[in-house]
Amino acid sequence: MSDNGKIYKGNIVFTKEAQQFSCYESGYIVVKGGKVVDVFDRLPEAYAGVEVIDFENRLIIPGFVDMHLHAPQFNNIGIGYDKELLPWLTAYTFPEESKFADASYAEEVYAQFVDELVRHGTTRAVIFATVHTAATEKLFEILAARGLGAFVGRVNMDRNGDCLTENTADSLQETEEWIKQHLSPEARIRPIITPRFTPSCTDELMQGLGELAAKYNIPVQSHISENLSEIEWVKELVPAAKHYADTYDRFGLFGQTPTVMAQWRSPAIWLTSARTISPSPASPRRWNYARRVSRSPS
Ligand SMILES: [Zn+2]
């Protein structure tokens, strides 16, 4: 039986070219076999007689791109913000993430997480996993099986992480082995270097991760300047750094390869860096607020 497909009508906004949005008011999307075949501002004669689903004056847009997600925090959704970031991490985040040492637990939670991404229309994402490589592999597999695209980070942390704290050399070696398994440029799910944030990473770990990012040309994600007590702590931990951003920059982790730095409900005025910062699309879930950080020409 031939598939005549379906046609969706509405105000269509999409990027036919990577750098340019196209807008078709009262346009048509032709879908066959579950895939978009073409987009038209006027429906060609050849499609007369095919079912048209009319969304009238509504917008039809591609999937959302979520620039910052913590997949292992799925089961912590909705617990509320009853603590500041740092005690919140030790009270809720780290205990939950420690469960991902069990790959079967990871598989169960990540399957639900990816289901929710799809349900919310998020088709591309930049994601933190945990320090557990086997669990991170499960996330790669589940995302790939669902046809999504993502950068996924096996998290690195070698201090102040309670039971998640890794040995520095082991963390780097395991990360490099993991990267080498995912170097295909055609892959939709790709690795991203992921130092959790400066309080979790010694200079030695940062240096090693910066070298891996450069060696394999891998992007970077982390956090920066999320609240004032954290900023003070970072000053104590890395007295040699000029400012928070420098704790990454000095090791090649701040725009030397494409970099996403996330903040948690804090104003960018806490940043003292001269780097250029511009807003990025955020998920409707708003677990976090992400900003893309690019290298300034200075
Ligand atoms: Zn985050």
Image (cartoon, grey):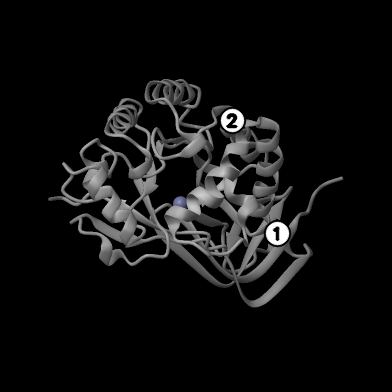
Badge 1 marks a residue whose secondary structure is helix
Q: Is residue 214 visible?
A: yes
Q: In front of the other: label 2 or label 1?
A: 2
Q: Residue at x 48, y 38 (%)?
A: 162
Could you tell whether 210 is left or right of 45 in the image? left
Which quadrant holds residue 281? bottom left
Q: Which mark is residue 137?
A: 2
Q: Is residue 176 above or below residue 201?
A: above
Q: How many marks?
A: 2
Q: Is residue 38 above or below residue 200?
A: below
Between discs 2 and 1, the one toward the N terminus: 1
The amino acid type, in three-letter code, at marker 2 is: Glu
Q: Viewer-proximal residue, 208 or 14? A: 208
Badge 2 marks a residue whose secondary structure is helix
Q: CA distance from mark 2 to mark 1?
A: 45 Å
Q: Is mark 1 within 8 Å of ligand 1?
A: no
Q: Is residue 68 visible?
A: no
Say which residue label 1 marks: 46
- Looking at this view, name the residue that lies furthest to the bottom: 57
Q: Is residue 94 above or below residue 263?
A: above
Could you tell whether 2 is left or right of 96 in the image? right
Which quadrant holds residue 122? bottom right
Could you tell whether 32 is left or right of 194 in the image? right
Whole-percent x, y for residue 96 in the image: 60, 44
Q: Is mark 2 within 8 Å of ligand 1?
A: no
Whole-percent x, y for residue 29 in the image: 64, 61
The amino acid type, in three-letter code, at marker 1 is: Ala
Whole-percent x, y for residue 130 in the image: 52, 38
Q: Residue at x 68, y 57 (%)?
A: 119
